[in-house]
Image (cartoon, rainbow, N blue to C red):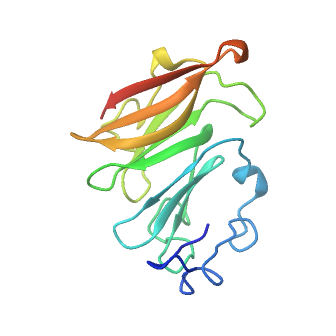
């Protein structure tokens, strides 16, 4: 993860010379970081970041260290592989995951999870903070974006590989 200043230069106050290597610097296991597609990054209200990477959300403080108040020791374990992340008004985070055990597997279904700003599941969303939209079975999320009214926009693709179809889905949170 790199942080750039307003002029496009690496921010020397973040990590080592503007860069945090999640495995090398923070000792996050490689199997947690394993991924095969787009993940995401979102700012926090206190100047830090949340990074969706593989099977975890990682909270980083403004200096690039683990964010002490985020999840457990700066991390939130995910049930599938993170494909997209966005921040909603008020600081809640939405993650689109694929329900796969290993990154080389074909997706079985999409899981949307919403978290409070400190990384706890949002109990007011779905079942314990998670939702599996049936129309998105066997789809792969590509991007999430906030939308007006505590909603999010989800873009992705639905396969079989021979017939790749794009989709656009508006999810009201």
Residue beneath the point at 36% across and 52% down: 116
Left/right placement of residue 64 relative to residue 113 reads: right
Closer to the camera in the image, 121 or 42:
42
Q: Quadrant of residue 47?
A: bottom left
Quarter in which the C terminus is drawn: top left
Q: Residue 127: image x %, image y %? A: 40, 30
Nearest the camera: 120 or 156?
156
Residue 65 in the image: above or below residue 81 = below
Q: Is residue 123 left or right of residue 74?
A: left
Count the marks: how many?
0
- Asked if residue 45 can be seen in this view, the reply is yes
Percent position of residue 35, x then y: 71, 45
Query: Split into 4 quadrants, where in the image is the N terminus?
Result: bottom right
Is residue 109 visible in the rendered image? The answer is: no
Which residue is found at the position 72% from the left and 13% from the top?
162
- Drawn side of residue 30 relative to residue 99, left or right: right
């Amino acid at each position: 993860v790199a942080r750039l200043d307003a002029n496009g230069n690496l921010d020397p106050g973040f990590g080592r010379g503007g860069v945090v290597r999640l495995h090398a610097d923070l000792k996050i296991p490689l199997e947690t970081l394993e991924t095969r597609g787009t993940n995401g990054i979102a700012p926090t209200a206190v100047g830090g970041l949340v990074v969706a990477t593989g099977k975890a959300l990682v909270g980083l403080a403004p200096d690039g260290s683990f964010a002490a108040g985020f999840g457990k020791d700066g991390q939130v374990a995910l049930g599938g592989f993170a494909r997209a992340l966005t921040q909603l008004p008020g600081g809640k985070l939405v993650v689109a995951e694929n329900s796969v055990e290993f990154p080389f597997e074909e997706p079985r279904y999409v899981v949307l999870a919403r978290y409070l700003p400190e990384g706890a599941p949002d109990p007011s969303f779905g079942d314990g903070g998670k939702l599996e939209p049936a129309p998105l079975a066997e789809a792969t999320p590509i991007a999430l974006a906030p939308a007006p009214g505590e909603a999010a926009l989800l873009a992705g693709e639905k396969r079989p590989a021979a017939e790749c179809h794009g989709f656009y889905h508006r999810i009201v949170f």
